[in-house]
Amino acid sequence: MEDTNRLYDGVRSQIKYNIINGVYPMGKRLKAKTLADELYVSRSPVNKALSSLYEEGLLNYNRNVGYSVRIITIEDIEEIFKIRAALDILSFKEASLKMDKSSFSYLRNLVKEAELAFNNNDIDGLREASKSFNESIYEFSDMPRLKMIISGLDDYIEVLRKFSYDAKNPESKNSRRKISVEEHSKMLDLMEEKSFDELENAIREHLEDSKNYIISQSHFYKDKIFDGIDRSDDR
């Protein structure tokens, strides 16, 4: 039983990784037999993994077609960023009240890592530093229930983060990548100063700009972002 569970966990993790990182593009049909051959396993753990990822919201299902990678819509993006704004405002404020000097120093280093990654055009490193920055804020906020809610959005947030940092003008001094690093640094300053009104405004502006940038770039992702929702494929 333990080996079976370990096999299932490995299959599910690999399929999920491929979805989030675009190995399986949005809209792609996922056939259990093809995936089983690709991962050198039987169909049983693959079918179980696909069902689980559907329940998680990463896949669509149609009786005639089967499973396919869910396409993010403009409406999805709007909703996710509204939720993020509410949760981030709360968690950033709570974290700032509970953090000590070493905590702020740790976040400063993450901002420096992000800046170095930007200067080296290391997009994966930049995205990872940004992810670590936000995850550390949630950790420092010491609000377990909030972290549970955030974890439910993690997959969508990671996909949108990839969109946000996949700038078409990476060398521009005004690129979204560079601005994001500067905004994180500014928010950290406001957290340390306990300037909560300004911090809330900075968070809202940061997320609004990120959302608008992703939507403005959506024409580059015609196979990934739809302007509207088609639920005809939902199970």
Image (tube, helix red, strand yellow):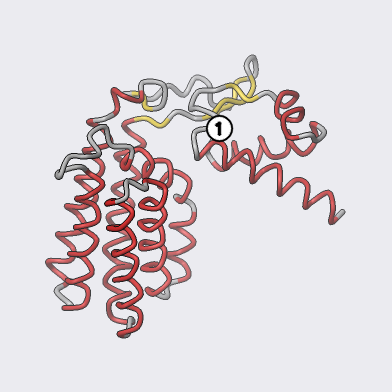
Q: Residue furthest top?
A: 64
Quadrant in the picture for residue 168: top left
Q: Is residue 201 above or below residue 193?
A: above
Q: Which residue is mark 1?
A: 59
* Amino acid type of the residue tagged 1 in the rendering: Leu
In this figure, what is the number of numbered marks? 1
Q: Quadrant of the C terminus?
A: top right
For the point 77% across and 52% down, the residue is 6
Does residue 203 appear left or right of residue 220 in this picture? left
Describe the element under mark 1 as helix, strand or loop: strand
Quadrant in the picture for residue 162: top left
**Residue 43 spot, x, y in % from top left:** 79, 31
Does residue 10 appear left or right of residue 130 in this picture? right
**Residue 169 spot, x, y in % from top left:** 22, 34
For the point 32% across and 33% down, the residue is 75
**Residue 147 spot, x, y in % from top left:** 45, 64
Q: Nearer the viewer, residue 179 or 159?
A: 179
Q: Residue furthest front?
A: 120
For the point 18% across and 78% down, the residue is 194
Quadrant in the picture for residue 160: top left
Q: Residues within 10 Å of mark 1 (few under 14, many from 20)?
A: many
**Residue 198 spot, x, y in % from top left:** 12, 66
Q: Is residue 71 above or below residue 208?
A: above
Q: Nearer the viewer, residue 76 or 161?
A: 161
Q: Nearer the viewer, residue 112 or 164?
A: 112
Q: Residue furthest right?
A: 1
